[in-house]
Image: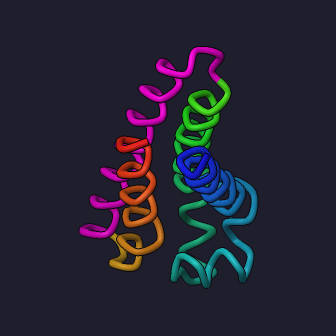
Amino acid sequence: MLATILTGLIALEHIYILILEMFLWTTPRARRSFGTTEQLAQATKSLAANQGLYNGFLAAGLIWGIVHPVAATGRSIEIFFLACVLIAGLYGGATAKRSIWLVQALPALIALIVVLFS
């Protein structure tokens, strides 16, 4: 149960990131979240939308794992996609913004540990 809740929360986080990157990239909220200026946000709008799409795929994979009718297969899917989120968060924290480690990588690591030991 806890594993499903944590995996679902990670999926929701990535749906939120998808929305920010694909649809709200140039708004003050997204610019604050990602530390961009209005000019940079306008110049990188299509790149951000592409990133948002990838975050949507991560969320879709996590949801697929949660709802898969075969529990063991669903668990394997969750492990794979949580590992993907963790790796993306580690890379993003190292190359873009350190807070990504706390916002993305750490929650994914916690969820991954819980799924692995449930």
What colour scheme does the image use? rainbow
Answer whether residue 89 is visible to the viewer in this image. yes
Q: Is residue 89 magenta?
A: yes
Residue 2 versus residue 24 in the image, above or below:
above
Q: Nearer the viewer, residue 91 or 7?
A: 7
Answer whether residue 46 is visible to the viewer in this image. no
Q: Position of residue 24 (x, y in %)?
A: 74, 65
Instruction: Identify the residue at horizontal 38%, vertical 66% (top origin).
Output: 106
Instruction: Identify the residue at horizontal 36%, vertical 44% (top origin).
Output: 117
**Quadrant including the C terminus:** top left
Q: Nearer the viewer, residue 55 or 60?
A: 60
Q: Can you name the residue that lies furthest to the top here?
A: 70
- Highlighted magenta segment, given as a residue range: 68-95
Q: Position of residue 76 (x, y in %)?
A: 42, 26
Q: Position of residue 107 (x, y in %)?
A: 45, 63
Q: Position of residue 53 (x, y in %)?
A: 59, 42
Residue 6 in which image quadrant: bottom right
Residue 10 in which image quadrant: bottom right
Residue 25 in which image quadrant: bottom right
Q: Is residue 81 magenta?
A: yes
